[in-house]
Amino acid sequence: MKTLLTGGAGYIGTHTAIELLQHGHDVVIFDNFSNSHLEAVRRVETITGQHVPTIQGDVRDQYALTDALTQHGIDSVVHFAGKKAVGESVSQPIDYFDNNVNGTLVLLRAMQACKVFKLVFSSSATVYGTPSYLPLDERHPTSSTNPYGRSKLMVEEILADVHHSSSNWALTVLRYFNPIGAHPSGCIGEDPADIPNNLLPYIAQVAVGRREHIQVLGNDYDTPDGTGVRDYLHVVDLARGHVKALERLQHLTGPELQTINLGTGQGHSVLEVIRAFEQACGKSLPYIMAPRRPGDIASCYANPARAQELLGWTAEYDLATMCADAWRWQSANPKGYRG
Ligand code: WQD
């Protein structure tokens, strides 16, 4: 396969690039670097010993996309590019729908023009809204409570209409649960541009001394210890799920639309994650109890059976490994790629 990774210089994109290259595939990265670093791509090249063609471009630029697709002989696309902070989406909905929805439409039009019809789309478990049952399987009803989640759901619905409109397209929607951790080399990892919205990078920045203390956002949920429960998934496991999804598309001879959860099937609470990270970094981490974050749900974890059935994929790494790998990255790169 020769795959274009839109947003491929980002956290999940770089980890996926490594796994694709190490499984014998070729990748081209297309990124506007609004929330990523070229240094991360350089490190992918160091880890793999392979050159990674990289194009600075925006997915809303159809000409740039068409050039990339044709000049590099692309036969498939993984679409990572998009904005992904729930809180920010509430204050900047136009930006979110322009980047996430309009960007996907422009990409689909460029792919159609270039007769590239194999696409893996980066979706999110956030499309399940407040779970009416757990664990979450792909048949669970979808809903959205914020513009970020709505943008993901809109794209899923666009892809369903594209699938029904033509027999050309082979489409896979991957619904990520909570990706955390880093490549075991410690050379690449999660590097939020501003104050981390997500739990794990915030904990890692406290551990390395960049932040004062962790805020536990709510300890009165209906969960075993009162704090939020999520399905944390090692980013390398997630990346390998993309390899499996692309290899499935590679062997497909007809049209298809599949929607697949990528999660471990196990939930961990905020306090469990803090304790696991303390074990990984060998320090006691300060935290305070704080009010719930608006829009947060109590528990969310996957039924991963369909990923095993369709892709032969299951997560391998446990929470201890995720925290150890995240700490190795953060302690070696206290200021991320800007260091
Ligand atoms: C996890 C748990 C918080 C921060 C979101 C998006 C999802 C995906 C991942 C993009 C919750 C608690 C958090 C903190 C805390 N994003 N928490 N203190 O909200 O499950 O998912 O990010 O793809 O689509 O919805 O992840 O890491 O923000 O929160 O106590 O400083 O940690 O309340 O229970 P979330 P998260």
Image: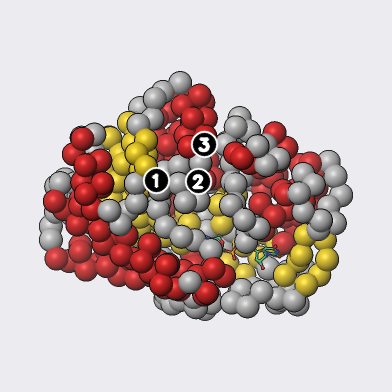
Picture layout, residue 145 above or below residue 232: below
- Tell which of 129 and 248 is nearer to you: 129
Residue 244 coordinates in the image, percent (x, y): 38, 42
* Point 67% across, 48% down: residue: 319
Residue 26 coordinates in the image, percent (x, y): 32, 31
Q: What is the secondary structure assignment of the residue under circle 2?
A: loop
Determine crowd level at label 2: few under 14, some 14-19, many 20+ residues with C-alpha closer than 10 A.
many
What's the mark number on residue 313?
none
Residue position for label 2: 36
Q: Is residue 313 left or right of residue 180?
A: left
- Tell which of 37 and 12 is nearer to you: 37
Determine crowd level at label 3: few under 14, some 14-19, many 20+ residues with C-alpha closer than 10 A.
many
Q: Inspect this view and state whether residue 214 appears.
A: yes
Quadrant containing the N terminus in the rendered view? top left
* Point 72% across, 48% down: residue: 204
* Point 38% across, 62% down: residue: 99
Whole-number angstrom distance, CA of label 3 to CA of label 2:
8 Å
Q: Amino acid at mark 3?
A: Ala
Q: What is the secondary structure assignment of the residue under circle 3?
A: helix
Q: Quadrant of residue 127?
A: bottom left
Residue position for label 1: 31
- Contact check, label 2 and label 1, Cβ < 8 Å: yes
- Contact check, label 3 and label 2, Cβ < 8 Å: yes
Q: What is the secondary structure assignment of the residue under circle 1?
A: strand
Q: Amino acid at mark 1?
A: Asp
Residue position for label 3: 40
